[in-house]
Amino acid sequence: MKPMTRITHLDFERVAQKTVKQLLLIIVTFIALYPLYWLVATSLKSQSDYLYNKFGLPWPILMGNFLTALRGGRFLRWFLNSTIITIGSTLAGTTIACFAAFAFAKMPFRGSNAILNFVISLMVVPPVVMIVPLFILYAQLQFTSTYQGIIILYVGLTMPFSVYMLTNFFKTIPHDIVDSAMIDGCNYFGILWRIYIPLSAPALVTLIIVNALWIWNELLLALVFLPRDDMRTLMVGITAFKSKLNLDIPVTMAGLLMTTLPMIILYIVFQRFFIRGLTAGATKG
Amino acid sequence: MIRYKWWQPFLYLTPMGLVILFVYGYPLIRVFDFSMRRIRGASGPFIGFANYRFVLRNPIFQEAVKHNLFLLVGVPILVIIALIFASLLFEQLRGWKFYRFSLFLPYIMAVPVIGIVFSYMLMLNGSLNEILRFLHLDFMALDWIGSPKIALKSILAIIIWKEMGFGIVLFFARLMSVSEEIFDAAKIDGANWWQTLWYITIPQLQIVIEFFAIVSIINLLSWIFAYVYTVTRGGPGSSTQVIELWIFNKVARGAPNPGMGAAASVILFLATMVLIFTLLRLRMKVGEEE
């Protein structure tokens, strides 16, 4: 016969504690998700539905806001600009960082550590500090509202973090592999290209995601250096969108949802890489 | 060991060097120069520290500095929230993976998107106040971003909403790498939740707590432009003006004055550097004493 389970005072306390903890987590999760729910729900309401029902579920569901937001092609143009700039900066930045990190990790010379530390320390320089001189320089070079102009800036601003992360990763790859490759007649570039890059695939994916996320979401530099309407990025576009379509909140929300959806989808698919990459600065030590 | 000629590492470093010189080197040197000139077009006459005097006496700039300093209240709040919820997640109650996924979601969303969403939700007749009225809490339905007294606090709340996920996930990742034995031992010794948090979790997390605090300080001083720009544009009046927005307005808007913008940039740059070096020094001193 099974012994009767007696509910003791301690058991009760444990259950109560667990319930309170679950409740706290549910509340904070609700707070974290609510604005996103509101964004999705509002984008599916008609203007008049929204005025009477500001936080309830959308009914009937309306897809027309997305078409309205896309009308005129400006939105697609901004989307294209953001895509070109994000892909261009990420690829160029990662490639340049790979070369530099390889030198820092595997070709040490007198002073190389000092240079590395200096580059890493640039991470804390606020970008707004560089804006005034660059603004004047860009006007002279006619770099304002060009892809190459903004891409150089994004490559530079993501460089300290990229070099920091890749150098740390390259340092963990043992020398023995390199030695045997050298014996096989591989040169340095071959070692980087055929050994280091493939072995670093997870680190590279993480880095590319972090950089792409940052560039896609960036507002200040895009606002200053891409003033022409047809060169705007999505972030600048939606900010202007807001002031123009101030009254049609559901259409604005449809635009915002399309703006943020690519990153949310990436996050759902690559959650691990996002978390690992964005917390990379602190997991060491 | 790889054998290489002396010039080879420099070849690999050259592209990075050029980019860094262009994006950081040139502007950081030039901003000091520009801050002492009356800029018209590409340059202008040397005027010494006049720009600095003007900036420091400018009442709106002073307000901006005060607002940035006020926002630092967010640092302890963020640390406390992150500590509590990271240690709750660490207990791996049912659904913890979903909680972690959801709590990190705001952190990957674009600030402009968040700013615009909140600016509509927090309007006088926006979603938040409609909910409060629905719950018969009319007295709590305030003009969150339209009133000069509350707007800055609302912006701080939005920043905390977005950044807390980063802290929680950061602390949680660190806790997962701490050996479980320590926590088991505490449990066997009969430590309660608070004792575990105070005597084990916090000391184990010390390094990441410092890291997160420093990152948050940097963010709240010099990375909040996008929030302010999309939620209030510095208003109403100048009640949410911050240093970054002030500098931005000196290059991009109505009456541009790059010289003054440069002087304010130098002040922000030096303040950030001094603060970070002080923090790092403090950290090293504490390390030596231990």
Image (cartoon, coloured by chain):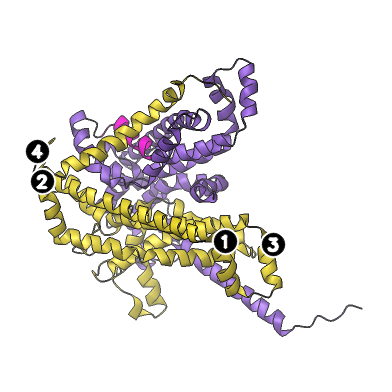
**Magenta span:** A145-157
The earlier-in-sequence mark between 2 and 3 is 2
The disc labelled 4 sits on which kind of residue? Gly
The disc labelled 3 sits on which kind of residue? Glu
How much space separates mark 1 and mark 2, taking CA atoms? 50 Å
Which marked residue is nearer to the observer: mark 2 or mark 4?
Answer: 2
* Residue A217 shown left or right of residue B237 in the figure: right
Same chain for labels 3 and 4? Say yes or no: yes
Residue at (55, 34) in percent of width and height? A170
Residue at (62, 21) in percent of width and height? A181
- In the rendered image, residue A146 lying in the magenta stretch gets the answer yes
Q: Are marks 3 and 4 in contact (CB under 8 Å)?
A: no
The letter of the yellow chain is B
Is residue B240 in sight in this rendering? no
Rendered image: mark on residue B48: 2
Rendered image: mark on residue B204: 1
Rendered image: mark on residue B44: 4
Q: Report crowding for label 1: few under 14, some 14 to 19, many 20 or more residues within 10 A (C-alpha).
A: some
- The residue under label 3 is B181
Q: Position of residue B11 (x, y in %)?
A: 42, 22
The disc labelled 2 sits on which kind of residue? Gly
Q: Chain of mark 4?
A: B
Q: Chain of mark 1?
A: B
Question: Is residue A94 positioned above or below A266 on the image?
Answer: above
How much space separates mark 2 and mark 4, taking CA atoms? 12 Å
